[in-house]
Amino acid sequence: MIPVETDLHSAVLDLITILKNGPEELVLNYSDEVYPLDLDFVYEPDQRISDQKTVLEKTDAIPKKVVSRNLNYLCTDCPGKMYPVRQYARAGKKDILVLYFNGSVDGKAKPDRSDRYIFGSPEEDGLFSRMCEASGFVLSDFHFQEFPACHFASTGNLDTAWKSRTDNCIKYVKKTVQEKNIKYIIFTGVCAQMYFGKEMALQKFKTMEFFDPEIDGLNVSAMVLRSPAALLGMEKKRKNAKGSDHEEILAEEKQIKTTILNALKRISDEIN
């Protein structure tokens, strides 16, 4: 093996000779090699690279799906907002919009299961579905929208903060009404009490008549119904009652359910 020092010393001597004698001392090619200036440098791209470029061009030509969050994710109108409802709106087939609220208003936090159920549980959805079928509808006929469309830290049961929240959120109801050509709005349960006030909501429920909700820019008819959760609560209370209490609760439950079915049938008769 030639020592590195000897090899380096030889290279330095060669360099000195070249610098003294000029470029002609450089060996550009050996006898069996092509002279460098006679070489043609022609670029021929690798076919694999060309194929990859074609794939990329075709991919870029495909319209990319625009992923946008629901409006309630972006909204910052209400102080005290904890997080938005996952799926706050569902489209239906007929011009009827059902408004409801599954969030907590009494400090007992409820899980957000809006990606699986409409009213928050299979029991509530099942009850409302049976009521729909008994009145000439199916569940998919209705548009559904949670109102308000976010979850909040509880600030007292149906106090002024909740009224402010529904007032802020009504613009999203108006948007749905205008886009889906809604003619009837059904306010259910607690969202009706938030928006109209508890006394007026209860009065509207007792009469079960259509009324003008007086929402600026909208020409719709509205109605207030008990929520499926309230009806299930009555069923549970009746099952746990005995004697005369059981009979009294059963009579009230039948009367309320019959009134709701008749109200839904009136809507069905008007649109069919």
Image: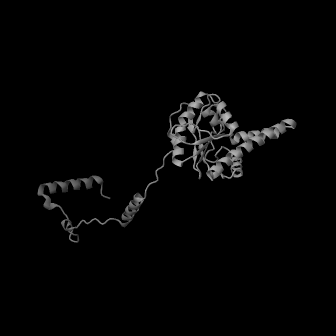
As drawn, the residue found furthest toward the right would be 243
* Residue 4 picture location, percent across and down: 29, 53
* Residue 37 picture location, percent across and down: 18, 65
Viewer can see residue 219: yes
Vertical comparison of 247 with 79: above or below: below
As drawn, the residue found furthest toward the bottom would be 32
Viewer can see residue 87: no
Left or right position of 178 against 131: left
Locate residue 190: give its quadrant: top right
* Residue 124 picture location, percent across and down: 70, 45
Q: Quadrant of the N terminus?
A: bottom left
53 or 125, which is in the foreground? 125
Left or right position of 105 against 83: right
Say how many tags the image has: 0
Vertical comparison of 82 with 268: above or below: above
118 or 60, which is in the foreground? 118
* Residue 117 picture location, percent across and down: 64, 47
Vertical comparison of 196 with 113: above or below: above
Kindly identify the residue that appears in the image at 28 percent across and 65 percent down. 43
Kindly identify the residue that appears in the image at 51 percent across and 42 percent down. 71
Left or right position of 205 against 185: right
210 or 122, which is in the foreground? 210
